[in-house]
Image (spheres, rainbow, N blue to C red):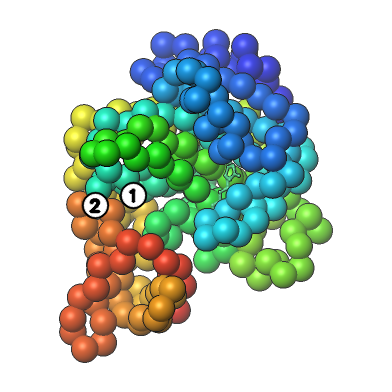
Amino acid sequence: MEFTTEELKKTLSSKTVEIGKEILIYNEVESTNSIANELLKKGYPSGTVVIADRQTKGKGRLGRTWISPAGKNLYMSMAIKPTIPPKFATLLTLTSAVACTTALRRLTDIPVLIKWPNDMLIEDKKVGGILTEVKIEGERIKSAVVGIGINVNMTENDIPEEIKEIATSLKIYKGEDYSRSLLALEIIKEFDRWYQLLEKRQRKTIIDRWMQLSGTMGRQVKIILTDKELKGTAEAIDEEGRLIVKLSDGTYEKICAGDVTLLRAK
Ligand code: BTN
């Protein structure tokens, strides 16, 4: 990372309400999400940010591995204690996707799009992902960790063969290197802003923005669920963050989990 913890904290001070008052930067961790969880258990405040140069067991969604080489990409987790009811937990991921996409667009001018629920795409290739882990206690969210992975300066050679077709980086698209610290700062600021809106129950503002930034709406999607596969048109996001899909027989299905594959453009 180009900046030290102190420089990051100083740059952020007075710019955020909650996120980034505490920031920890590591050379190597198994997963920043796991560290963020441990820090919460140790009593670190909501808004604590963990960043690592490299992950040895980077976690993706659905039990996948997140490729996390040293010195190239951004691996960052935010430990938070949201007060929203558990049924809105998916909105944490959507909020984070809005924040990351806004930050990426501002910093790079690349027209990054969101694919439900958590992917950030450049020309249909994945440039970033979000893994949100939520702990629920009774009727409330006890804590949550929002983990963000952005492929920043990876080159084609750094991307394993098996994901070359589906993954990209800011550098591959633009041909230039980006500062991971500046990107982290932008994301933290944006996340703070959108997360405060979520905490203030401004869900519609977040969902409307998500829809604007989404490359999924109006497109044909294939949804792979554990027990079946669905095909239809992605129509909207409901207030709990579920994807509403219109199936070929005219009925609607609300999707909360599973994998969404884009079939073709509008
Ligand atoms: C996905 O699209 O599958 C989600 C990827 C999330 C990766 C990030 S990298 C930082 C944080 N720590 C992890 O182990 N995973 C997330």
> Image quadrant for the N terminus?
top right
Circle 1 residue: 90
Q: Amino acid at mark 2?
A: Glu
Q: Amino acid at mark 1?
A: Thr
- On screen, residue 148 above or below 122: above
Residue 220: tell me if it is visible.
yes
Quarter of the image for residue 195 reads: top left
Q: Residues within 10 Å of mark 2 (few under 14, many from 20)?
A: some
Circle 2 residue: 240
- On screen, residue 25 above or below 126: above
> Image quadrant for the C terminus?
bottom left
Left or right of residue 208: residue 149: right
Q: Any mark on residue 158, and which?
A: none
Q: Are marks 2 and 1 in contact (CB under 8 Å)?
A: yes
The residue shown at (20%, 52%) is 239
**Residue 155: image x %, image y %?**
76, 53
